[in-house]
């Protein structure tokens, strides 16, 4: 029985080991597969985020490139418009100079007349005042043009430096202000030109009126005053010549200043054009850099696509492995179920065996007890009873008692008790008074014999 119990224990231990190994293998494989899947999903998500950020950077760079191209084209067109307007203004100034030369000729014609000298002087004074006003207006125009050029150049530099954030709004506002200023100056120059024409018309009308008066005065004047007239005219002519020379010198200086101004304007236009060309070149360089960046991004996207394909292939392999692992896990689980069923069967068999063993052990112990009790009865009766037929029959019967169960022993014990009742009364009393009778009575009561 001990060997059977040991073998049963070994079998149970082996079954428990197999269970633990199956559970550990399935759990470790599942954990590895889940960890690999989670890491690959994280890598794929990070890669998708990188691709999205690169696509957004590429779109922003393209929009910035388009905006810079538009702004450069607009600025170049506006610069050409302003250069044309400056050229028109220079032509108007040359026309005003021609008008001034015509006025000089008119003054020389008026210098021949004696009576009109005073009026001519006054008119010359007024004309000089007008000329000073014109000079002042020209200076204002030039300063305004210079200021506008400076502001325009500053605006160009600022707009090119800040073309990403505030280029469109500031450029529009400053260009509108420039256009307004140039339009105002053009209107002022037109007004001055019209005023000068009106003044020339008035002077011509006055000259014609004075000529008519002179003709009348000549008719009335005598021949005696001719010499005085000539002397006075000579002195007046000399004074007028001096003043005309001074005026010519002033006009020459003004022409020289205007020429210098024109040259300066041309130089500034050249500088502005060079700046615009340099900015265009810078924009072209930026364009090439952006194109190179775009090429790098495309190459990176191609490499990233390859990486994605590799990851997808790896994912497929892992999915296949996971499917094979899941099939293996399912088969292992099926095996586990079969083993559990077998273990349950073995447990049931073991329980049945244990019950059988317990029963057998109980029956063996019971038989041992029965044998010992029958031995005690045999000794008690053999020692206490006297020799005779009854004693011999009792001892024979004790030897033939079936020692297998209490139920089988009960009828034999009844017959023994009945045989003892056939003994003489004295012998029964002696046996009842003895110590052995108590053990005899216990055995009989135990098996239901009273």
Image: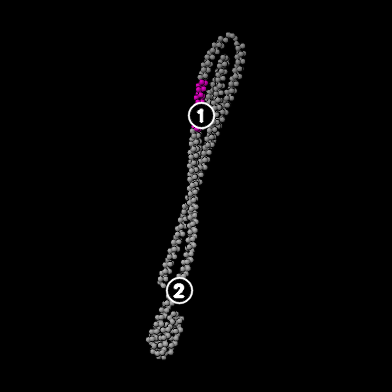
Left or right, residue 251 beside residue 371? right
Image-based side of 72 in relation to 357, left or right: right
User: Could you say whether the residue bearing mark 1 is in a helix, strand or loop?
Assistant: helix
Q: Position of residue 300 (x, y in %)?
A: 48, 44
* Magenta region, main secondary structure: helix
Q: Is residue 164 above or below residue 357?
A: above
Density class for disc 2 (Cα within 10 Å; few <14, some 14-19, many ≥20) is few
For residue 216, which quarter of the picture?
top right
Whole-Å distance between the Cαs marked 1 and 2?
122 Å
Placement of 329 over or under 82, stated as above or below: below
x, y (%) of residue 446? 44, 81
Disc on the earlier residue, 1 or 2: 1
Residue, x 60% and y 14% (percent of image)? 214
Residue 83 disc label: none
Q: Please state which of residues 344 and 4 is positioned toward the viewer in this rendering.
A: 4
Where is residue 200? Give x, y as percent.
58, 21
Q: Which residues are magenta?
A: 251-277
Dot label at residue 269: 1
Residue 228, placed above or below residue 20: above
Query: Which part of the image, by quadrant, shows the N terminus?
Result: bottom left
Residue at the image point whose x is 42% and y is 79% from the top: 367
Residue at mark 2: 356
Q: Work out whether residue 404 or residue 296 is closer to the camera in this orientation and state it.
A: 404
Magenta stretch holds residue 257: yes
């Amino acid at each position: 029985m001990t060997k059977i119990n040991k073998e049963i224990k070994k079998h149970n231990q082996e079954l428990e080991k197999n269970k633990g190994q199956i559970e550990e293998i399935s759990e470790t494989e599942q954990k590895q597969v889940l960890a690999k899947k989670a890491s690959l999903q994280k890598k794929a998500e990070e890669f998708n985020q990188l691709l999205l950020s690169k696509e957004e950077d590429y779109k922003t760079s393209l929009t910035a490139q388009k905006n810079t191209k538009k702004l450069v084209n607009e600025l170049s067109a506006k610069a050409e418009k302003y250069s044309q307007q400056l050229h028109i203004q220079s032509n108007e100034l040359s026309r005003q100079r021609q008008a001034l030369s015509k006025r000089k000729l008119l003054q020389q014609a008026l210098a021949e007349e004696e009576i009109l000298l005073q009026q001519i002087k006054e008119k010359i004074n007024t004309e000089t005042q007008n000329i000073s006003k014109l000079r002042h207006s020209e200076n204002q125009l030039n300063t305004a043009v210079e200021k506008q050029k400076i502001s325009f150049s500053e605006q160009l530099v600022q707009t090119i430096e800040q073309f990403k954030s505030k280029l469109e709004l500031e450029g529009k506002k400053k260009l509108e202000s420039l256009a307004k200023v140039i339009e105002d100056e053009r209107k002022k120059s037109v007004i001055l030109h019209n005023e000068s024409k009106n003044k020339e018309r008035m002077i011509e009308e006055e000259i014609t009126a004075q000529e008519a008066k002179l003709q009348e005065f000549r008719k009335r004047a005598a021949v005696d005053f001719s010499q005085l007239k000539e002397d006075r005219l000579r002195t007046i002519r000399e004074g007028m010549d001096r003043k005309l020379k001074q005026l010519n010198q002033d006009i020459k200086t003004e022409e020289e200043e205007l020429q210098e101004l024109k040259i300066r304007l041309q130089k500034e236009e050249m500088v502005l054009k060079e700046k615009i060309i340099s900015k265009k070149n810078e924009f072209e360089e930026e364009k090439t850099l952006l194109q190179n960046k775009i090429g790098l991004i495309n190459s990176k996207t191609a490499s990233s696509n390859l990486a994605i394909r590799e990851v997808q292939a790896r994912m497929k392999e892992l999915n296949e492995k996971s499917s094979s692992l899941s099939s293996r896990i399912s088969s292992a689980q099926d095996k586990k179920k079969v083993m559990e069923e077998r273990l349950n069967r073995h447990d049931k068999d073991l329980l049945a065996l244990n019950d059988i063993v317990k029963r057998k052990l109980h029956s063996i112990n019971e038989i041992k007890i029965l044998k010992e009790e029958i031995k005690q009865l045999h000794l008690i009766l053999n020692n206490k009873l006297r020799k005779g037929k009854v004693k011999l029959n009792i001892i024979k019967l004790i030897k033939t008692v079936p020692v297998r169960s209490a139920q089988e022993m009960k009828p034999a014990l009844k017959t023994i008790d009945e045989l003892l009742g056939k003994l003489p009364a004295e012998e029964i009393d002696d046996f009842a008074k003895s110590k052995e009778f108590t053990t005899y009575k216990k055995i009989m009561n135990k098996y239901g014999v009273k």
